[in-house]
Each structure stands twice: as structure tokens, then as C-alpha cells.
Image (cartoon, helix red, strand yellow):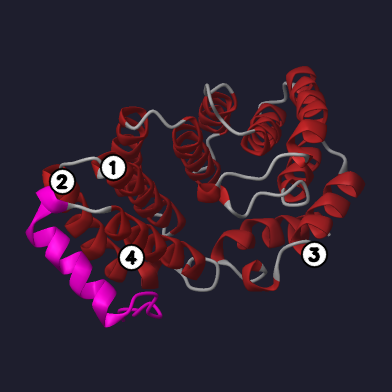
Amino acid sequence: MVVEAPPVTTPDDEQRIAYAIAEPTLLDGTTVRLLAEVLANQRRLDDTLSASLLLPAVIPQWQTVRRFTAQAAGPHAAGLHEVTAEWTQFVGWLHAEARHDSEAIRVLIEAADEADAVDSGPLAAQVENFRGYLERQRGSPRGVVRHFLAAYHTPGAAALQRVGDAVQAAHGYALLDDRATAARLLGEASDLTTVAESQPPPGLAYWLTPTFFRMSLGLAYLALGDSTMGVDNVRAGLAGLPADQRDAEWTQEYRDALLAAS
């Protein structure tokens, strides 16, 4: 089954994009904006549809945009490269969600290179965050620590990103029974939260809120053996999600954690 995303472009918009793809040296800012809107719409669909349904629709568009980007020129090419870098990491994320582990790693390695090429701290940090998520699904605490710490220490990462990465790295350390380091990172995350609450999340990580991190905080407490704090935080995090995210595929690990703790 292939999912068709609800249209976010008009026929005129589609004609403009098609013309730009045919004449990549004439790229204009409106085309870059339209492609960014298409990507944003796909990312929102990930909150309501499974990755396995989305991938067959997303991959062909991503591949077309990558070919287009490689040939684009002019003052708006840099903006297109940033959109494409985000698209690549989104495809990597979908593969991670669908547990296409090898393909997820391959695409996310490419995404890391693209994030560095466009000099984006938030994009670079998010790639490492997605790698950490995949390692958690694979049951590799050292991989969890390695990638979430890399995300936490990425220069230019947003404050809200760093809060979540510190909490999730702490979870990895708790799984490794390094309670002291886990506690230290949870303390650093708490200190960062005040700063983070005064700053909006980067657009590429629209879902980040201080409440969102309570799900990951709950996992960390559960791994530390504090079931009361763990269950309370996971429940609060799930309850704080917007309605369109509450049944997202990526929430299942938190529901599973609640079930195991009860």
C-alpha cells in the first residue's frame, strides 16, 4: 500500500517545482519554500501513519529532490541543500522506526554528512538523536550513550534538543548501571530546562517541549529502579502530547514500558 499525502501545493505550485527541476540553474526562493512545505507535511504524517506506509511515498520524492539539489545553482541553492539534508534524515528516521536497521544507519550517516555540509547544529544533533533512538530499539545501551552524548555535545544544538539528549544519554548510563553518571546528566538536563523553556524549538524538531521529555525521563527512572517516578513521568509525557501525536508509532515503546512496569 502506498500512501498519498494530502496536497499542500496547488497545480501552479507543482508546475513551478517541475520547471525548477527541469532547469535547476534557475532555482528560485519560492520553489525552496514549497519543497520545505511538502517535507513538513510528510513529517506531520509520521505522527499519524506508520513508517512502513510512508516510506514508499517519501523515498521517490526524496530521491528526486536529491538529484535536483545536486544540480541546483544560484543564490537559493544553499536553502535547498538545507531542505534536502532534513529530508535525508527524515528518511533515515522512517527506516529506524520501521526497523530497517542497516538502511537506517546508512541513510543517517549520509544525513550527518549533509548536516555538516550545510553547517546546521540542530540538524547535526538531530541525526545523532535518531541514531540513539535506533540503538535503543536494538537494545544497545552503549550505542544509546554514544549517540545521545554526541547529540548533547553537538555545537549549535538548540537548548530543547540538548535537554532531551541529556535525559536519553542518562537512560543509557542507567541501563549500564552507571548510576552516578546517569544522575549527573539528569541534573544537567534539569538545569538546562529553565533556559530551554524560554526558547522555541527549531522548526525541524517541532514536537519538542519540556513535557515531551517526561517520557524519556520516565524511562531513565525506570532503568534506575524508581518505578513510581518512572511511571508518573511516562504517563505525564504521553498525556501531554498533542492529540495528533498520541497514537504515533514512536509512542509504543513508552506504552510498552508502562505495561512492563505495572
The correct choice, above or below, for 56 with respect to 222 in the image is below
Q: Which tag, 2 or 4, sits closer to the chain's start?
A: 4
Q: Are marks 1 and 4 in contact (CB under 8 Å)?
A: no
Q: Would you name the residue on which mark 1 appears?
A: 81
Q: Which label belongs to residue 224?
A: none
Does the magenta portion include 13?
Answer: yes
Location of the N terminus by quadrant is bottom left
Location of the C terminus by quadrant is bottom right
Q: Are marks 2 and 4 in contact (CB under 8 Å)?
A: no
**Magenta stretch, residue numbers:** 1-26
Three-letter amino acid code of the residue under disc 1:
His
Q: Which tag, 1 or 4, sits closer to the chain's start?
A: 4
Q: Would you name the residue on which mark 2 appears?
A: 72
**x%, y% of residue 78?**
29, 39
Per the model, the C-alpha gap separating discs 3 and 2 is: 44 Å
Q: Which tag, 3 or 2, sits closer to the chain's start?
A: 2
Compare residues 85 and 168 and report the one nearer the observer.
85
Quick check: 208 left or right of 186?
Answer: left
Q: Which label belongs to residue 55?
A: 4
Per the model, the C-alpha gap separating discs 1 and 2 is: 9 Å
